[in-house]
Image (tube, rainbow, N blue to C red):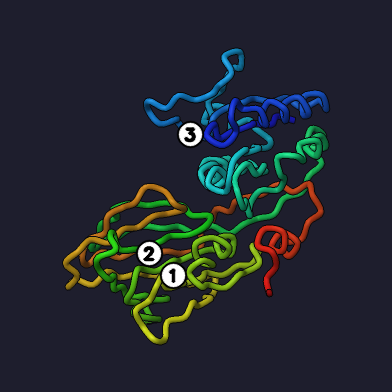
Amino acid sequence: MKILLSSNPYRDRGLRAALEARRVLENAGAQTSLCLPFQPKKGDRLDLPRQVKLSQMDQELPNADLLICFGGDGTILHAARDAVQHEVPILGVNMGSVGFMAELERGELAMLAPLAQGRFFTEERMMLDVKVMRGNREMSRDLALNDAVISKGSMARVAEVEVFADNMKVSTITGDGVIISTPTGSTAYSMAAGGPIVEPTSKCIIVTPVCAHQLVARAMVLDQDRMITVQIPKSIRKYLYLSVDGGKAVRLSSGDRVEICKSTHCTKLARVADRSFYEIINQKLGGIVP
């Protein structure tokens, strides 16, 4: 069993959790490699142990049976784009605050031992293909596990967008923007903006307005097979921005459209703990109802 350990050095200081996990897994018979999930920011001084050899993620993933991420949900989201290309399951160890996608907490590393014999099951999580179109020209393409957010660039103005489903107009949203999310992303920004909590293994697309300047503006749950189009009006004079899974923002101009649909790819999350989604909600949020 080849297991790749990917640790966020800003969360896992000195890679202590990853090194402890490596001891647990190797004692149980697994082969491991340790890497960073991303290139550290230039000039940052990280607490990395000198004696530890770090491998390259892109070189190790093609031969890995499992990827374990140490960090918050952002670390898992970042890793998902690479892991999905090789159909490698991901298991998250929460080193952040909430960590909805993480399977284990920092103090539960002993539960990793069965992974060495391949004793785990996987959940498939729906993803979204996101592309920006300018006329007939494709400007960018991305893959989302959580969400695609179209928003205004400053607090001083209001964004207006039109939302279509299979070329049928769903809504005109005036406010701070709109979130198009997967069921996995329903407990992220969409929930904070007033969207519904959806079981993460469901298959649907959620459209949630952000701070709408309208008396009636509701989140909507659409069928998984809808093609969602967010149209930027040609009359708009200011730029809007698209961010996919919290990544670097893409600037949108007047007349652009963002096309979002269910991807053929899906993220596989590895499970070893016998916890239901409702237990996790109650633990992380203190309960669905007061």
Q: Position of residue 150 (x, y in %)?
A: 36, 63
Residues at marks 1 and 3, CA–CA distance in whole angstroms: 32 Å
**Residue 252 appears at what percent x and percent y?**
26, 59
Three-letter code for the amino acid on which mark 1 is drawn: Met
- For image coordinates 47% across by 72% down, the residue present is 207
Is residue 90 placed above or below 161 in the rendered structure? above
- Tell me the quarter of the picture where residue 92 sits: top right
Mark 1 Cα shell of 10 Å, populated few (<14), some (14-19), many (≥20):
some
Instruction: Find disc 3 in the rendering and name its residue.
Output: 38
Residue identified by numbered label 2:
259
SS type, badge 3: loop
Out of 158 and 239, give the one closest to the viewer: 158
- Element under disc 1: loop
**Residue found at the far front of this picture:** 290
Question: Dividing the image into 4 quarters, which one contains the C terminus?
Answer: bottom right
Image-based side of 280 in relation to 87, left or right: right
